[in-house]
Image (cartoon, helix red, strand yellow):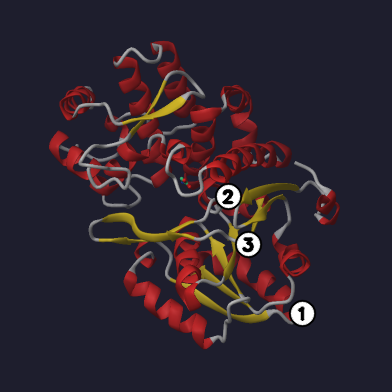
């Protein structure tokens, strides 16, 4: 994890490399990286005009410091501040964003800086991928979810009426700067929802990391600097390895969707709102994947209960019945939403199931009737 260039990093920061055939990039994780971001960008990517894309909430907290350092170094081209929330991940927001970036005079070697959470990272990354047929961009994630997952790996996207992330591209960032200090202002519920994506990586590939998360989750949620940095670094390093082996998600990368086929369906049913955050939907989805695997005789009841107990201890939902509000989805509606999954081929869903903690696998062998019966059982148990 360390390298000669770590010496240039602020104290406590870690460097993870993502190695790809088309080139490698670094993910820098640690406290107080935002005030140093302009210098880190200049040192690693050279002199380039930088246009920041962010949202109102993040701008209020973090934009002035980034703008000021870029200005001082003569790198600043301008900022585009969007409305916060999933509605900005749309064709309606993409078009004016691209025009604005072009108006700022960005050329191929210049940089888009995506400052914010998953929505900003996905949208700004997609804009960068189509501007002048692809310009460079830097992810500066300010949520835990974006730092452990969405800012790394080059998936960019917008949503349409048909579903989330159905229009997008693979376009790798040139650098990722994850300042753990920027997480201090996150509401605890948003922080815990982001934590789910770290636990997801443990549950799909790294049982030892899950043991460590169980022992350290209280410290992580209290934002102890060392524990938080270690949690993010392990998840990112694990994801970096998977992305390096399967950038375009033809095999192993699919495992990173553990809990997401169920989760996306629940999120869509709930209407992509505060009622059910993405990470919360994934927590339920992971528990469903474990319980379905248990019903199929693949994983022990003890492992399923252990995973649910871990999420419950962090006040995360673990079953459909834990979703706030009086309504519950119909089984056929959930199945219909699951069929929108991007991993569907020849009409068959690819599900990510488990043979144990840290042992996920992809399968297309689960018959729809089996899934229907499983979901009916889960809904029958929902209050
Ligand atoms: N978030 C899943 C992936 O990047 O592949």
Question: Quick check: 208 left or right of 326?
Answer: right
Q: Nearer the viewer, mark 3 or mark 2?
A: 3
Q: Is residue 190 above or below residue 350?
A: below
Element assignment for label 2 = helix
Q: Do the numbered discs 3 and 2 sit on residues whose CB atoms are within 8 Å?
A: no
Please state, as top left, top right, bottom left or bottom right, where the C terminus lies in the image: top left
Q: Which residue is mark 2?
A: 147
Q: Residues within 10 Å of mark 3 (few under 14, many from 20)?
A: many
Q: Position of residue 5 (x, y in %)?
A: 82, 54
Q: Taking 173 as reference, is 383 left or right?
A: left
Residue at horizontal 32 percent and vertical 29 percent from the top: 319
Q: Earlier in the sequence, mark 1 or mark 3?
A: 1
What residue sits 39% from the left and 38% below the top? 282
Residue 327 seen in the figure: no
Seen in the picture, residue 271 relative to 235 is either above or below; the reply is below
Residue 72 is labelled as: 1
Residue behind mark 3: 174
Indicate which disc, 1 or 2, sits on the residue closer to the N terminus.
1
Q: Position of residue 140 (x, y in %)?
A: 61, 60
Element on which disc 1 rests: helix
Q: Residues within 10 Å of mark 1 (few under 14, many from 20)?
A: few
């Amino acid at each position: 994890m360390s390298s000669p260039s770590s010496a240039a990093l602020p104290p406590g920061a870690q460097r993870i490399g993502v190695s790809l055939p088309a080139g490698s990039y670094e993910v820098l994780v640690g406290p107080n990286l935002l005030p140093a971001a302009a210098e880190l960008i200049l040192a690693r990517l050279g002199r380039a005009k930088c246009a920041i894309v962010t949202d109102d909430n993040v701008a209020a907290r973090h934009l002035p410091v980034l703008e000021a350092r870029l200005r001082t170094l003569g790198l600043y081209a301008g900022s585009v501040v969007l409305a916060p929330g999933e509605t900005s991940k749309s064709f309606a927001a993409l078009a004016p964003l691209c025009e604005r970036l072009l108006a700022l005079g960005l050329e191929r070697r210049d940089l888009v800086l995506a400052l914010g959470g998953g929505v900003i990272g996905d949208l700004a990354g997609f804009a960068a991928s189509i501007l002048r047929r692809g310009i460079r961009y830097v992810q500066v994630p300010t949520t835990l979810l974006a730092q452990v997952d969405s800012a790394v790996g080059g998936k960019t996207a917008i949503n349409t009426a048909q579903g989330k992330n159905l229009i997008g591209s693979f376009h790798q960032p040139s650098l990722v700067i994850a300042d753990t200090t920027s997480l201090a202002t996150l509401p605890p519920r948003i922080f815990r929802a982001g934590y789910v994506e770290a636990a997801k990586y443990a549950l799909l590939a790294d049982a030892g990391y899950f043991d460590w998360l169980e022992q350290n989750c209280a410290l992580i949620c209290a934002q102890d600097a060392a524990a938080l940095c270690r949690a993010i670094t392990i998840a990112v390093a694990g994801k970096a390895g998977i992305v390096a082996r399967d950038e375009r998600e033809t095999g192993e990368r699919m495992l990173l969707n553990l809990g997401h086929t169920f989760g996306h369906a629940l999120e869509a049913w709930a209407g992509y709102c505060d009622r059910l955050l993405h990470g919360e939907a994934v927590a339920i989805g992971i528990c469903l994947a474990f319980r379905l695997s248990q019903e199929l005789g693949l994983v022990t009841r003890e492992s399923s209960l252990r995973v649910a107990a871990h999420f419950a201890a962090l006040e995360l939902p673990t079953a459909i019945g834990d979703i706030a509000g009086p309504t519950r989805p119909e089984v056929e509606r959930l199945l219909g939403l699951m069929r929108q999954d991007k991993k569907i081929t020849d009409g068959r869903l690819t599900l990510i199931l488990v043979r144990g903690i840290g042992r996920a696998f992809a399968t297309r062998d689960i018959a729809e009737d089996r899934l229907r019966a499983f979901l009916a059982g889960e809904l029958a148990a929902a209050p």
